[in-house]
Image: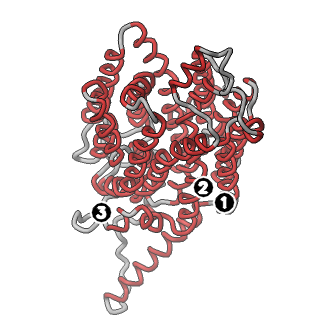
Amino acid sequence: MMGKKRKRIIGNIIWSKKGYPKDSEESGLGQASLYHALIIIFLEFFAWGLLTSPIISVLNDTFPKHTFLFNGLIQGVKGLLSFLSAPLIGALSDVWGRKPFLLLTVGFTCAPIPLMRLSPWWYFAMLSISGVFSVTFSVIFAYVADVTTDDERSSAYGLVSATFAASLVTSPAIGAFLQDMYSENVVIWLAASIAILDMLFILVLVPESLPEKLRPASWGSQISWEKADPFGALKKVGQDILILLLCVTVFLSYLPEAGEYSSIFVYLRLIMDFSKEEVASYIAVVGVLSVLAQTLILALLMKYIGHKQTIMFGLVFEIIQLTCYGFASQHWIIWLAGTMAAMSSIAYPSISSFVSAHASPDQQGVAQGVVTGIRGLCNGLGPALFGFIFYLFHVDLNENSLLLHAADKGDNLSHHTPNSAIQSVVPGPPFAFGAVLVIMALLVAAFMPENPHSGVAKKQKLAAAAAFELQEEGKGGKKHEIEPLITDTDVEL
């Protein structure tokens, strides 16, 4: 019975329409629902996941020396551009709707894929520039906020993150298999075809989720430079608490996570002596556990302990995970870290849900844009930070070094025997440093309020009262009983 009840709840979330009337000019198939967002995310990142192995080959061929450094620079430029543009794109989607910006962000995110085979230099140039619009998650989360109620939102965000994890679990192995069976070109063109399919799905089948009544009546003065500025957008969205949440908690927790993603699999091969098969198994197991954590466990935690405690729960497991990576000397510790990584994956959907609870319905785009922008900045800074720390401690993660180590495993033990007392205790210094950053994020998160909804409701009531008083003063003090067609408090979050 419990299993049937849980399936009904998930089904209600996926097909939720939040009770908004269908817009007269709405395009797409049916009304907007969560499953549209899930398909968009899955196809986009499945296409990129197929390219896991070809990307490494293109990097090594294009930058045979200082491969890790150039990869960090490219990701750094892309991340900085995402940080600067994400709030503006989110704010524009609050005015013009989600669908055009879903098409724009998915198109620019996937635009570099065919260039990987046509011209590697243009591929890396386009990859850097694409950061301006590579903020699909901000628009997706705003889309989800439009079609779900507040009670459903955290579970819906968990489903989106779980779909993202599922796409990255399945696609790298499929891409590697196709590359071995056929060629690298087949994988690249298949990924490009899936990206085009994703764009066609948005263009033809995805309906608009933002109702006309939540958009500004005038198109002349709705976007200000305050919303375009990522720091000004923070103040616009949620005052001091979101400044604290977004600028500190998100940055400190996701910076080491981004650095970890950029280096962990090479680290496992080179430092921990994992085989290719073990790495593939590791990715699959962690991915499956992440999907379970972001669906079942996240829903239970949000129901029984709330936003703040769920965020802190995820940060605690991230600290354990990074500590295990930093101090691990045996394989079982790495597998333990993978389990902790799956549990820590609930932190991001919890934060996105917390931010959504602070933002009004007409500011969901800019709110999620701020979060995505900070994550984009971390995606650029994290690999550079980890690469710099590896360099300071003379840990070489170059793929060529890995091949030399595999060819001369018996004689060359320098990769396994640290050159200093610090390295003998801490084989992975960047991960240990990342654990310190997440501890700081946890301390900051401890100061967040327990209930984010109370502040929003209070501001809405004050705004409604102020508007009524201005109406009385404008009519010479005469009270009018005419109510507005819609107020913020009428909109069901």
Q: Which residue is mark 3?
A: 216
Q: Are marks 2 and 1 in contact (CB under 8 Å)?
A: yes
The quarter holding residue 338 reads top right
Residues 248 and 491: in front is 248
Q: Colour mode?
A: secondary structure
The quarter holding residue 392 reads top right
The quarter holding residue 178 reads top left
> Which residue does the image show at 60% across and 49% down from the upper left?
253
In this image, 156 relative to 405: left or right?
left
Q: Nearer the viewer, mark 3 or mark 2?
A: 2
Q: CA distance from mark 1 to mark 3?
A: 35 Å
Q: Which three-letter amino acid code belongs to the residue tagged 3?
A: Pro
Determine the secondary structure under disc 3.
Answer: loop
In this image, 330 relative to 294: left or right?
right
Residue 431 in the image, given as x and y percentages of width and height: 65, 41
Q: CA distance from mark 3 to mark 2?
A: 32 Å
Q: Which residue is mark 2?
A: 249
Q: Which three-letter amino acid code belongs to the residue tagged 2?
A: Thr
Q: Which residue is mark 1?
A: 444
Residue 371 in the image, given as x and y percentages of width and height: 48, 52
In this image, 314 relative to 41: left or right?
right
Q: CA distance from mark 2 to mark 1?
A: 6 Å
Residue 489 in the image, given as x and y percentages of width and height: 46, 64
> Which residue does the image show at 48% across and 44% down from the upper left?
379
Residues 279 and 198: in front is 279
